[in-house]
Image (cartoon, rainbow, N blue to C red):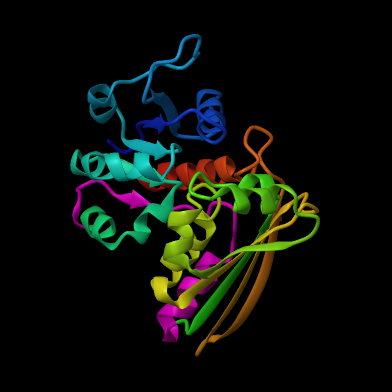
């Protein structure tokens, strides 16, 4: 893209996250960036934005914003980057797969751009990891039980979640496994692992709590640089309670930063 020209953006997916991103880009709220269109698995009728084929998207866009889930990222990341198009990914949990992560890292000349998503403090954790490494990180996430029901759960597990009267520990284990098992709920753990550059150092505790009106993430980290603890509480998205309402706005912030860097 030539200096001073508009940063042309395609939005992959038009659900709770993608619809907000597309609306805001179309409204001109991201200075220096414009919505080129949306990319969907299946065409939709009545959509106000232009629907792009992959051929058109890769020819016309400078950036594709992934808002469609881990599977969509796995299917499309390498070809986007290989065409010289930048990629802003919201479903970073897909990078828990080392084979996929290596293929993305090797792809280009397009750039993979990450976003803080539903949390903050990643710059500090990244700096601490660079200084001396992070020895351990515990990400404790608390969400409403109904948002954590997964297709792979058996009837008993589903029932325990749906009938929970108090906090229930749904998962405890490494971030990579958490990102695979809860693909729409624990991209936060993936963001932390990528920030510190060590999936093995990050452990996750996931709680289902019927009193959790806000989605809570508590990150506690320790390493040679110091000890860090911070909590983030977000309101769920009104369009999809499985994700935090702040996520599309975090993507828009990242788009603005990318557009500014290109001018």
Q: Which residue is located at x 31 percent, y 45 percent?
A: 74
Residue ID at (77%, 52%): 210
Relative to 61, say whether 94 is above or below.
below
Q: Is residue 152 above or below residue 190?
A: above
Where does the image place residue 122, in percent across and percent down from the top left?
52, 65
Q: Specify whether 81 is left or right of 236.
A: left
User: Does 121 appear in magenta?
Assistant: yes
Of all residues, the one furthest to the front in this rendering is 156
Horizontal side, residue 50 vs residue 109: left or right: right
The part of the chain drawn in magenta is: 106-133
Q: Is residue 263 visible?
A: no
- Is 227 left, or right, of 25 in this rendering? right
Which quadrant would the N terminus be assigned to in this image? top left
| Residue at the limit of the structure toward the top, as seen here | 46
How many marks are shown on the rendered structure? Answer: 0
Between 10 and 183, the one nearer to me in the picture: 183
The residue positioned 62% from the left and 48% from the top of the image is: 158
Using the rendered image of the protein, determine whether residue 65 is visible from the camera's viewpoint: yes
**Rendered position, 232 above or below 129:** above
Identify the image quadrant of residue 103: bottom left
Name the spot of residue 105 as percent of width and height, x first: 24, 58
């Amino acid at each position: 893209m030539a200096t001073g020209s508009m940063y042309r953006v395609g939005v992959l997916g038009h659900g709770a996250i993608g619809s907000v991103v597309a609306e805001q880009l179309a409204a001109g709220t991201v200075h220096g960036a414009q919505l080129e269109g949306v990319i969907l698995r299946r065409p939709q009728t009545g959509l106000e934005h232009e629907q792009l084929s992959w051929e058109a998207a890769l020819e016309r866009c400078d950036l594709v914003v992934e808002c469609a889930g881990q599977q969509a990222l796995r299917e499309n990341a390498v070809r986007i980057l290989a065409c010289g198009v930048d990629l802003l990914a919201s479903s970073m949990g897909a990078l828990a797969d080392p084979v996929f992560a290596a293929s993305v890292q090797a792809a280009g000349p397009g750039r993979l751009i990450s976003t803080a998503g539903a949390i903050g403090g990643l710059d500090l954790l990244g700096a601490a990891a660079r200084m001396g490494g992070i020895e351990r990180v515990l990400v404790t996430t608390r969400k409403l039980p109904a948002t954590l029901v997964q297709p792979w759960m058996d009837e008993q597990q589903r029932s325990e979640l749906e009938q929970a009267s108090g906090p229930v520990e749904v998962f405890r284990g490494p971030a990579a496994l958490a990102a695979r098992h809860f693909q729409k709920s624990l991209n936060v753990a993936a963001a932390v692992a990528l920030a510190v550059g060590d999936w093995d150092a990050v452990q996750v505790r996931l709680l289902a709590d019927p009193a959790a009106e806000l989605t809570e993430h508590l990150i506690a980290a320790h390493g040679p640089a110091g000890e860090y603890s911070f909590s983030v509480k977000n309101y769920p998205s009104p369009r999809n309670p499985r994700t935090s309402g702040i996520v599309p706005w975090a993507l828009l912030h990242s788009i603005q930063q990318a557009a500014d860097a290109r001018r």
